[in-house]
Structure formats: structure tokens, C-alpha cells
Image (cartoon, helix red, strand yellow):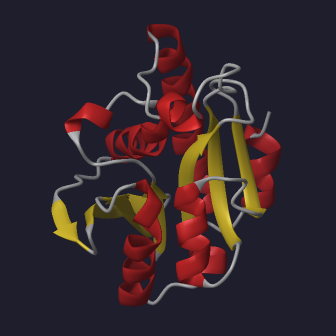
Amino acid sequence: MYIIVGLGNPERKYENTRHNVGFIAIDRIAEKYGIDIMENKFKSLIGKGQIAGQKVVLVKPQTYMNLSGEAVRAAADYFKVDPKTEICIIYDDTSMDVGKVRIRKQGSAGGHNGIKSIIAHLGSDTFVRAKIGIGEKPPRFDLADYVLGQLTADDRKAVEAAADKVADAMTHLVAGEVDEAMNDYNG
């Protein structure tokens, strides 16, 4: 069993925002692998299916970004997965150019409140993460306003292309081939 979590905020007004690229990626993964995300469980919308012969659960926390750890912990406990090897968190990163992808095995929260919450609830920063770049905030711009701002049409295309890469990388990740995924998709 492998849990794939995309971070975002649940209300319609957040649908096309930079902070919701995790939800965008989960939707692409669901579409690519024919998984319906319809069930309401663990303070999340979830869908169960298979990727490359492995059972997976796709998770879109409905707790709002800053409380994402509550949903991740609940799903991890229910499915009895090892967060270090059987969870991947997909989220936005302001330190990377728009549309860049970076897969890592562990790391700090880097100022990301959703990741801070997950680290606090899991008690570890060792879990696979797939970061999608949303670009650096402009000078004198409030970070919250920037990440909650709408994606431009060009940025949306770049994020969707990145989400496609992350969806493709899942065949490696669910098989435990994190190094291979990093080699093939980081950059």
C-alpha cells in the first residue's frame, strides 16, 4: 500500500492558486491511472486504485494547508503504512522556478506550513516528497497573498506539465525506486 497526498486548500476559491498545485497533481494522477477520488475519509477526499500493480490511495486533505498533518497521520495510521517508505507528499515550492519538479527522500519544511504540520504529526521529516515549483514571490509581496494568488495561464500550463511528470514518476515511487525517480524527474 502506498499513500500519495497532494496538498491544497478545499474551497472552490482556491482551485487555481499556487498553493493548490498538490491538488492539481493528484487530479492528474487520478486521471492518468483511472482512480476516482470520491470517498470522504480521514478529513480528506480519497480514491483507491493501482499504479504499476501496487495498491495506492490518493489523498486530498480537506483540513486546509496548515493542518494537513492531521489528515496524513489519520490515513497513515488506518492503512498501517511506514511514512518513511510508503507515503509521498506533493506540494508547491516558492524556491523553484515555475513548473520545475524536485523529488526528495526527506528534508526540512523550508517554511511550508503544510509540511511543518505533516512533520509534526508524523514525528519525522523522512518521507518522500515531490515539490512543484511555483516561482519566487515578487519583492514587497506578502507570501500568503502570493501562494494564495491565482496561477496565470502560462504558469498553469507549466504546473500541469510538472504534474504530468509527477504522475509518471509514481511508477518508480510506488515500487520504492526513489533514486530512479530523482534521476529521471529532478531538474
Q: Looking at this view, is 55 or 114 the one in front?
A: 114
- Give the vertical position of 72 relative to 26 (above or below): below
- Give the vertical position of 91 relative to 124 (above or below): above
Name of the residue lying farthest toward the top: 154
Q: Looking at the rendering, in which quadrant would you find the C terminus?
A: top right
Q: On the rendered structure, is 7 left or right of 30?
A: right
The residue lying at 17 percent from left, 57 percent from top is 38
The residue lying at 37 percent from left, 72 percent from top is 71
Q: Position of residue 84 (x, y in %)?
A: 66, 78
The residue lying at 42 percent from left, 40 percent from top is 20
Q: Is residue 174 visible?
A: no
Q: Position of residue 44 (x, y in %)?
A: 28, 64
Q: Position of residue 149 (x, y in %)?
A: 44, 26
The residue lying at 35 percent from left, 41 percent from top is 27
Write down the quadrant of residue 139 in the picture.
Answer: top right
Q: On the rendered structure, is 157 left or right of 85?
A: left
- Give the vertical position of 134 relative to 167 (above or below): above
